Image: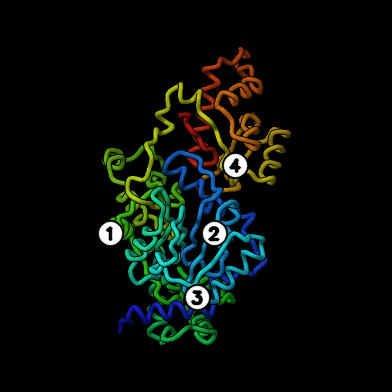
Amino acid sequence: MKIPNSQLQEKIRQQFEAGPYPRKPLEESPKEDYDFLFIHNLVTPFYLRNKVVVDCEGKVILDAGCGSGYKALALALANPKAKIIGIDISEESVKLAQKRLHYHGFQNAEFHVLTIEELPELGIEFDYINCDDVLYLLSDIVAGLKAMKAVLKPDGIIRANLHSFFQRNFYYRAQTVFRMMGLMDDNPGELEISIVRDTMKALKDEILIKQYTWKPASEEDPEYYLANYLLQGDKGYQIPEMFAALKAAELEFISMVKWRQWELIDLFKDPLDLPAFLAMSLPEIEEEEKLHLLELLHPIHRLLDFWCGHPNAAKPVVPVDEWTDADWKKGRVYLHPQLKIPKLREHLLQCITYQRPFEISRYVPGSTINPVKLGNGIAACLLPLWEEPQPMMSLLERWLKIRPLNPITLEPVRENEAIAEIKAVLRELENFLYLLLQRSG
């Protein structure tokens, strides 16, 4: 029997009222989870869209479905000069979120008991909206997207996500089993959790639903069961459904949040040696089709996690690969602000001192599948970026001082050779947004 939407939404509210999510201790902080903060830093999505480094000072950020406030805390840490506003349907969650932000010293934050559909009642426009692990629980995802769009500034950006139907498929089967057992008729508690635990442990290890869902390391964690086996209102979606919802809400897709992990070409052993048909067809297909092919072939992502905004809000951009020599000479180089951390700089200095490669991806691994390393000479060249942005020509001058001679011929390095080397490094690092390149004018 299908549960009416109003009853289902009340069940969802009750579940999170009884167990605010995530259940992290008040004193716990993501301040050293640099990958997590990289995603929540406004510079990341705004640069992806406009290739401009934004200043978060004065920005107003909404955490739509803030839960217990852990992600609101991440938004505050990543954007320290912004105002944080959180909403949630659970009064207990809102109380905990407010308490969490105050505990960590963030006074420029406020929280409200409110549904996403009621957002316009706040009378506030937002520069950025974070709607993480919430949208798929709404009875109408298009209505949710429209409500967020209604309070989004013209150049604002929304981050939202949907559960992946393919990646979560075995969990949905498990939820059906436990729904048939009556464990989701009311708000699941300790009794229902214990029944799920006993059932899963009783299954043979080779049973597929156990192979693909059971995590012995989490068997004593109540949140593991409530967020997976017993999650009220949980639904899975596919990429075409995601794009259809964006179209219906009149929103424009910007990028997947972990965009470098959504590269279809990376699924192949040798991207430069594809079968003729694939080599000809893959470059021609639309972004939606590429993403859908990837989720069909290799559904590793729990979330279809994306950024979107108002149609035609993106400013005209000249891709770095199309920059002229004049663009490069006048260009300015920025270090992503989330990498300006003492621990990273200390590691960088050690690598320079002891002439070891510097693995920059060690701190933000979500930007890439493979490690990204810099030779100690290049690392030394980029060192001033940890203090402030640098003109391209300043980095060139520094590179010529660090490496004045060609190590093979021992001839002086010519300026055009040095420029080519610097450009190659900057292009690679810009692909992962470790460095941000901005044209002048």
Give the label, 4 or 2, closer to the camera: 2
Residue type at tag 1:
Ala
Name which of mark 2 and mark 1 comes first in the sequence: 2
Q: Amino acid at mark 3?
A: Ser
| Tally of marks | 4
Q: Position of residue 231 (x, y in %)?
A: 45, 75
* Residue on which disc 3 sits: 90
- Mark 4 is on which residue type? Ile
Residue depth check, mark 3 versus mark 2: number of the one nearer the observer: 2
Tag 4 near tag 2, CB within 8 Å? no
Q: Which residue is mark 4?
A: 360
Mark positioned earlier in the residue sequence (1 or 3): 3
Kindly report the distance in space between the C-alpha atoms of the residues bearing marks 4 and 2: 30 Å
Q: Kindly identify the residue that appears in the image at 57 percent across and 68 percent down.
A: 97
Q: Which residue is mark 1?
A: 248
Alpha-carbon distance for marks 2 and 1? Answer: 28 Å
Confirm or deny contact between disc 3 and disc 4 (CB under 8 A). no
Q: Of helix, strand and loop, which one carries label 4?
A: helix
User: Could you say where residue 144 lies in the image, as x and y percent from the top left?
Assistant: 36, 65
Determine whether 155 is above or below 401 in the image. Answer: below
The residue where tag 2 is placed is: 84
Which element type, helix, strand or loop, lies under badge 3?
A: loop
Which of 134 and 219 lies nearest the eye of the viewer? Answer: 134
